[in-house]
Image (spheres, rainbow, N blue to C red):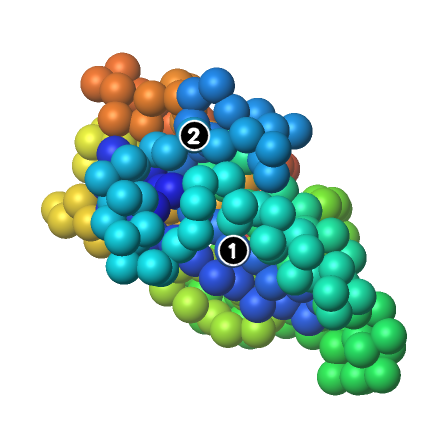
Amino acid sequence: MHRDWFLQGANVFVELYADRIEVIGPGSLPKGVTLTDLGHKSLRRNPLVADLLHRIDFIEKAGTGIRRIRDGAKAVDCPEPEFEADSFVTVTFRPNPEVRQAAGGELAAIPEVTGQATDQATGEVAGEVAGQVTDQVTGQVTEQVTEQVAGQVTEQVAGQVRLLQALSGEMSRQSLQEALGLKHRNHFNQIYLIPALQAGLVEMTIPGKPRSSKQRYRLTPAGSEVLKRIEEGQ
């Protein structure tokens, strides 16, 4: 109901971490809505979908969703959910501190990144790269990249590395796709572009208009740092 359907090929993601759950929806907030408005003001991005869901009693009246989320977290003594918005809207849920503490080692730190995992992920990058990225790049981007490489070596990890290496300056989607030698747009979006956008490694030059014909993509500072560490490890 709330997602931006103009951002083609993008899906809603639910990501599980040792200390949180992140729900990530494609598209920025509707025009005229800010983070401070959430829970106080409501603007239906897709009114036809909203009306249909209301008629079948799937949703309540407009504007109650954020408040219900916050109330639900409070009811089980969890921290208030955190909201972020750029090219995607991310909601982060954290567990009840007492429950997390009782779980002990099961919710311990992220596993150490190994050279073997990195080699499997990229097929090209030297084994020390992931460790260097973990040591040098701080914040959420590092945590996401590290967990992906260490926890489950996926095609998306290798795709993000290839995308960073192919991106030069500001490039269109088609130029990036051609640089990577990829023919299928949906495959490029799902495996390469969208994961890199979500990880904060790549950003849009016109985030408010995802489908603009003038849309280009470029490395973020975090993406440049990751690429630097990768190149140093080769």
* Disc 2 + disc 1, Cβ < 8 Å: no
Residue at the image position 13 percent from the left and 46 percent from the top? 183
Q: Nearer the viewer, residue 12 or 159?
A: 12
Give x and y (percent) for residue 197: 45, 41
Circle 1 residues within 10 Å: few <14, some 14–19, many ≥20: some
190 vs 91, left or right, is: left
Identify the residue under disc 1.
Answer: 23
Residue at the image position 24 percent from the left and 49 percent from the top? 52
Residue at the image position 74 percent from the left and 84 percent from the top? 106
Q: In the rendered image, is residue 160 in sight? A: no
Local secondary structure at mark 2 = loop
Figure check: 99 above or below 224: below
Local secondary structure at mark 1 = strand
Residue at the image position 51 percent from the left and 25 percent from the top? 33
Give x and y (percent) for residue 135: 76, 53
Tell me which numbered mark, 2 or 1, is placed earlier along the sequence. Answer: 1
Q: Nearer the viewer, residue 176 or 198?
A: 198
Identify the residue under disc 2.
Answer: 43
152 vs 71, left or right, is: left
Circle 2 residues within 10 Å: few <14, some 14–19, many ≥20: some
Give x and y (percent) for residue 234: 54, 51
Q: In the rendered image, is residue 22 in sight? A: yes
